[in-house]
Image: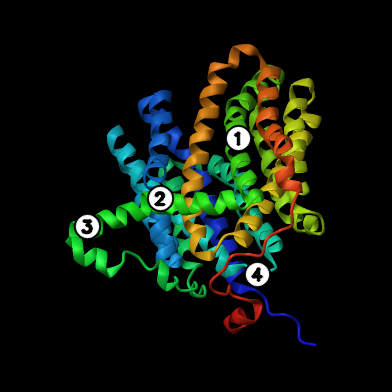
């Protein structure tokens, strides 16, 4: 019997995600360092990072509509190429406003690239293999969190220009790796866009109004209907917001914990962050092993265990168990992310995937920022209080909404067009 063909589109997408994230994690280190070094302002560094997220927050609905109605391959490649052109210009800027303008331009590339790659999952991962395929993709996204900052630390002594040019090279590689991806399924005729009578009756202005209404009103309404109709998907969506709130709190909690408990251990914050990255990388590879269990129970369990890990951290005063606990937390976070992606892919129509993530990601970013703000406001209450808030935000909603995760049978995926199967991608060999 002939061995099943290797899924080259999935491998290409995984390598593209790895390259793009590796460069992005390096810029996440280099950009604030550049602002701090040249202008010495932590406030301006934070504002510059926020400006990079602004296009995604403002235009997520538009981007999702364009991705779902167009070719996500072009948007994914275009986003990476746009980033490759903009990022090397950062160290050449001679004014803060120029750096911030380039950060906005980089954010535009990010806004297109992320939902486009999420949409390509429906092409690269065949139906019935959502868990295994998304496990590989999550590993490709998480592994750079461990490698990228370390590479950036090695490159910084040789100059910021080398750091940003390296990021641009990885972005270019991420675009090239998508060449040869199979074409996505065509959009159904009833989703093709504004109807001819409406456009003819109102002229260009009416057509533009209809397009804007579709992007900002109709898409949101349809997504809301689809998500609320599927109780499991609704619970996962809600818990993703509260999880990001807890994750935002951890952004400040972790360096405070490292400074207060391990001031005699230089670089302890980096070790703790690396522990999370290591665990996330391992969890992505191991997530497929949980496919034999009810996915709602897996999703609830990993959220609860991760919350308990953060709650335990202030009680630990030795580096080894603290790092070990964060490795465990990172592993369970990755498993939960794999389950989330796999369930979204199997439950939403392919034509809605880009729009779902284009609206989800800005909201998650908003809850992340809210968590960071809350942690700053609540720092005076102590580490244990912050850790308890992280645990409640991560584990509490999953426990309270457990009936939505554990009850009911999994609905069949809503697809109007078939997703590429392994036999369809064998021609790529």
Mark 2 closeness class: few <14, some 14–19, many ≥20 residues within 10 Å:
many
Which circle's residue, 4 or 2, is located before the other in the chain? Answer: 2
Residue with the mark numbered 1: 242
Sequence order check, earlier mark of 1 and 2: 2
Q: Earlier in the sequence, mark 2 or mark 3?
A: 2
The quadrant of the picture occupied by the C terminus is bottom right
Quadrant of the rendered image containing residue 205: bottom left
Residue with the mark numbered 3: 206
Q: CA distance from mark 1 to mark 2?
A: 21 Å
Q: Label 2 belongs to which residue?
A: 61
User: Label 4 crowding class (10 Å Cα cut-off): few <14, some 14-19, many 20+?
Assistant: some
Does residue 24 appear left or right of residue 412 in this picture? left
Q: Are marks 3 and 1 in contact (CB under 8 Å)?
A: no
Instruction: Identify the residue shown where x is 64% and y is 46%.
Output: 236
Q: Which mark is residue 127?
A: 4
Image vertical order of residue 266 relative to residue 154, above or below: above
Which element type, helix, strand or loop, lies under badge 1?
Answer: helix
Residue 154 in the image: x percent, y percent?
A: 56, 42
C-alpha span from label 4 to label 2:
26 Å
Where the N terminus falls, by quadrant?
Answer: bottom right
The quadrant in which residue 387 appears is top right
| Circle 1 crowding by C-alpha within 10 Å: few under 14, some 14–19, many from 20 | many
How many angstroms separate mark 1 from mark 4 (CA)?
29 Å
Toward the top, the furthest residue is 380
x, y percent for residue 15: 58, 62
* Residue 116, position as x, y percentages in the image: 47, 59
The numbered mark, 1 or 4, whose residue comes first in the sequence reads 4
Residue 197 is situated, as x and y percent measured from the top left of the image, at: 25, 68
């Amino acid at each position: 019997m002939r061995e099943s063909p290797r899924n080259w589109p999935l491998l290409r997408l995984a390598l593209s995600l790895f390259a793009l994230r590796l460069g992005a994690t390096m810029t996440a280190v280099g950009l604030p360092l550049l602002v701090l070094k040249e202008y010495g302002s932590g406030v301006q560094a934070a504002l510059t990072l926020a400006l990079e997220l602004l296009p995604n927050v403002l235009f997520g609905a538009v981007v999702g509509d364009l991705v779902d109605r167009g070719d996500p391959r072009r948007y994914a490649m275009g986003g990476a190429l746009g980033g490759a052109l903009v990022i090397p210009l950062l160290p050449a800027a001679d004014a803060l406003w120029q750096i911030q303008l380039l950060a906005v331009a980089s954010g535009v590339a990010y806004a297109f690239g992320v939902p486009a790659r999420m949409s390509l999952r429906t092409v690269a991962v065949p139906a019935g293999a959502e868990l295994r395929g998304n496990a590989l993709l999550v590993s490709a996204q998480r592994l750079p969190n461990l490698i990228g900052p370390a590479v950036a630390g090695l490159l910084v002594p040789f100059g910021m220009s080398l750091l940003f040019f390296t990021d641009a090279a990885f972005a270019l590689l991420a675009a090239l790796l998508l060449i040869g991806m199979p074409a996505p399924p065509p959009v159904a005729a009833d989703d093709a866009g504004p109807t001819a009578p409406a456009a003819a009756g109102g002229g260009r202005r009416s057509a533009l109004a209809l397009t804007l209404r579709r992007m900002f009103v109709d898409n949101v309404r349809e997504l809301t209907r689809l998500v609320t109709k599927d109780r499991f998907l609704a619970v996962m969506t809600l818990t993703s917001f509260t999880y990001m709130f807890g994750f935002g709190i951890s952004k400040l909690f972790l360096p405070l914990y490292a400074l207060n408990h391990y001031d005699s251990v230089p670089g302890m914050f980096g070790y703790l962050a690396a522990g999370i990255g290591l665990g996330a990388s391992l969890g992505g590879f191991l997530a497929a092993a949980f496919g034999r269990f009810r996915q709602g129970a897996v999703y609830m369990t990993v959220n609860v265990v991760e919350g308990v890990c953060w709650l335990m951290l202030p009680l630990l005063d030795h580096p080894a168990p603290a790092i070990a606990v964060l490795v465990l937390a990172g592993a369970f976070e990755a498993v939960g992310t794999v389950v989330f992606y796999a369930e979204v892919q199997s439950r939403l129509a392919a034509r809605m995937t880009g729009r779902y993530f284009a609206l989800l990601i800005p909201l998650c970013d908003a809850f992340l920022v809210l968590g960071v703000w809350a942690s700053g406001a609540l720092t005076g209450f102590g580490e244990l209080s912050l850790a308890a808030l992280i645990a409640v935000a991560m584990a509490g909603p999953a426990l309270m909404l457990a009936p939505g995760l554990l009850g009911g049978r999994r609905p069949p995926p809503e697809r109007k067009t078939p997703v590429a199967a392994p036999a369809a991608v064998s021609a790529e060999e």
